[in-house]
Amino acid sequence: MSASRLAWPLGVTAVMLMAWEMAVAALRVKTVVLPRPSAVAAVVLERWPLLLEHLWPTFYQILLGFVLSVAGGLVMAVLVVYSEPIRKGVLPLIVTSQIVPKVAIAPLLVVWFGTGDLSRLLLAFLIAFFPIVINTVVGLTSVDDDYIKMARAFMGTRWQIFAKIRLPHALPLIFGGMKISITLAVIGIVVAEFVAAQRGIGYLIVMANGLLDTPLMMAAIAVLSAMGLALYGLIVALERVVVYWHAPAETTAGGTP
Amino acid sequence: MAAVPDSVEIERACKTYASGLEALRDVTFRVAPGEFVSLLGPSGCGKSTLLMMIAGLVPVSSGGIRIDATVVTTPRADVGMVFQSAVLLPWRTVLDNVLLPVELLRLRRRDHEGRARDLLAMAGVEDFAARLPHELSGGMKQRVAICRALIMQPRLLLMDEPFSALDALTRERMSLELLGLWERLRPTVVFVTHAIREAVFLSDRVLVMSARPGTIGFEVDVKLPRPRQLSIQESEAFNRHAGALRRAIEAEEVA
């Protein structure tokens, strides 16, 4: 992103933070209700070791949950496209299952799979996998028929048509799905940490809440958000390299967290 | 029996879709090796379907299609095809697009790269070999698509309204360039179009198709000298051919 495109949103953010800072001071809002941004920043600096200790497990579980979602989503999408029983039988179930707010299943997952990493990864997977499936299915099947005809006329096999035409054609949409998916993976892991965890940013937020330490809570949220933004940026950067021929595709599917 | 079999033989080819729609009825014609034949007709007359059948992409309902005396059931490596749009893969460079048929046939790329570059040079787009398709104009894209169709040195080149999406001036230039390529490489060409003057300018023979069901009603031997220049379109002979074809098409429409 060019400097000039960043300048406006950064400027607006700065103005909003300043307004917040001044409003809290002027209205004498209690710190436990709303700390000043400078106080939150100070906590981030002072308690950085503590934040980092809890950020790390959250970070790697988000990444792992995301990678599992992408891998599982791609496999499921290929099955949906190439297998009629799965397209007709399983895809409607996957779509309908999106009605269930998966966050509400979190306690149930803990009952079934314990308080360890597994139930957290599972929740992240359940939330983040859907946009990958839908976007990949749309990407693989939205190839203009002329391209398929062309490839067949030049003796392309089914496998070659998949590997050399459908899959590259789907890449912009797959990246669109990945951008939704990574933010959903963050939600999945943090919510699971709310429910049952001994460490992680979600755990830290709940703990700080219990201690009425609002500045620490907000510092944890700030650090978590920064990490989410960084992960999103990483995917955008990867997209620029992989999808070099095309502007980033608009995403076509969302998911209910 | 002639020593050299016809390049394309179509005998009483019919196409009826499952919906009951009769697209083609009793289409019969032959194309000699090296001949340039156009199929001329209004849209919806089944001329593109016929071309897809020759390409082995659409099965015939009855009747037969043979290429070099072999019945067509699937696409063949020695047939090149150009579509209405260029259908270049946007993530491949121009050179890689031209080499796509080589890759699909699992042949060695370096054995064909030299010829790919020669073809691009003949088509006047060699400077764009490393570019991506979106950097090219419509005419240049279609030139690349023609190079792709010629990379396996096809004996038969099938063209489905290849210039119909181009502006009039580009279209004329492309016709002239196509004739230049054809005179050098001499493949057999079956060219589908709905433009009368384009058909006359390019072809040795023009077959007029009527619609619903599509069938061949009229044929014109274009006896114009080659090599042809664009100025030939002003000649009396050219306009006589074009006039005959126009009247034939109008008669079909009235009938």
Image (tube, coloured by chain):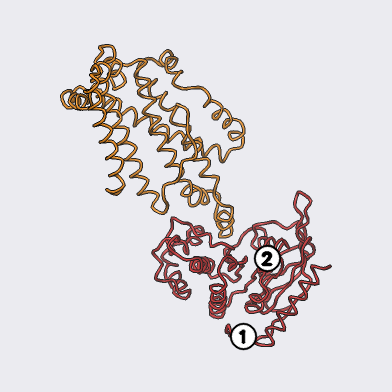
CA gap, disc 2 to disc 1? 37 Å
SS at badge 1:
helix
Question: Where in the figure is residue B113, as x and y percent of width and height?
Answer: 42, 67
Chain identifier for the red-coloured part of the image:
B
- State which quarter of the image contains the N terminus of chain B: bottom right
Mark toward the start of the polypeptide (2 vs 1): 2
Question: Where in the figure is residue B138, as x and y percent of width and height?
Answer: 50, 65
Which of discs 2 and 1 lies nearer the camera? The answer is: 1
Q: Is residue A147 left or right of residue A46?
A: right
Image quarter for residue A220?
A: top left
Question: Where in the figure is residue B221, as x and y percent of width and height?
Answer: 72, 81
Q: Chain of mark 2?
A: B
Q: Colour of chain A?
A: orange
Q: Which residue is mark 1?
A: B232
Note whether A61 is above or below B158 in the view shown: above
Say what amino acid the circle numbered 2 marks: Thr
Residue shown at 40% from the left, 38% from the top = A179
SS at badge 2:
strand
Same chain assignment for discs 2 and 1: yes
Q: Chain of mark 1?
A: B
One can see residue B5 in this view: no
Q: Which residue is mark 2?
A: B70
Note whether A11 is above or below B212 in the view shown: above
Note whether B208 is above or below A207 in the view shown: below
Say what amino acid the circle numbered 1 marks: Ile
Number of the label disc, if any, that sits on residue A114: none
Q: Is residue A8 left or right of residue B223?
A: left
